[in-house]
Image (spheres, rainbow, N blue to C red):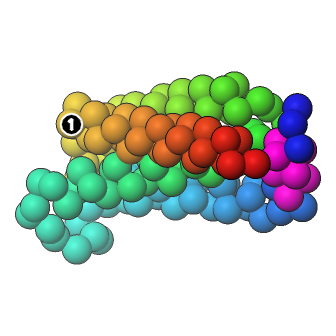
Amino acid sequence: MNYYQVKLIKNLLEHKRTIQILTVLWTGLVAYLCLVSSESLPKVNVFEFDKLGHFSFHFGITILWFLFWKTTYRNENKYALLKAFLFSFFFGAVIELGQGYLTTTRNSDINDIYANSTGAFTAVLLIFIVNKWRAKNQ
């Protein structure tokens, strides 16, 4: 490990509890908002707005779970990134199935899974680019 990695891990470990709490709260909020009755949510008839929401939810989930696994289990970047992406993908798929089978006001939508995956993949790319840039500049 180089100096940059040691310093980054030390800094993340100082905020470990905050990261853990934010990760669980964000994931719970996403699950709640995706499974709550759509009648209690404001009506927006714009297709892109819904997909942007899914993109944003899973972008955040992927980043937070990456930080969670990086700080809690001290995973290497590539394993933490893989776990975060897979968690986001499968979590999103399970939520979509739940919308179709567990709710009466929601439907499963394959386009939501595409939006979820795109958000997760974009987060992985961003984390990868930032880590490469930081390693190069340290």
Identify the image quadrant of residue 81: top right
Q: Is residue 9 magenta?
A: yes
Helix, strand or loop status at disc 1: helix
Q: Residue at x 22, y 74 (%)?
A: 42
Q: Residue at x 34, y 49 (%)?
A: 55
Where are the magenta residues, as a range? 4-11
> Residue under circle 1?
111
| Image spot of residue 68 (x, y percent) | 73, 46
Q: Nearer the viewer, residue 39 or 82?
A: 82
Q: Residue at x 29, y 71 (%)?
A: 40
Q: Is residue 73 left or right of residue 132?
A: right
- In the image, residue 117 sits, relative to residue 123, either above or below, namely above
Q: For the residue marked with disc 1, what is the amino acid?
A: Asn
Q: Quadrant of the N terminus?
A: top right
Q: Nearer the viewer, residue 93 or 13?
A: 13
Q: Nearer the viewer, residue 64 or 1?
A: 1
Q: Answer whether residue 131 is visible to the viewer in this image.
A: no
Q: Answer whether residue 132 is visible to the viewer in this image.
A: yes
Q: Is residue 61 magenta?
A: no
Q: Residue at x 89, y 44 (%)?
A: 3
Q: Is residue 43 left or right of residue 22?
A: left
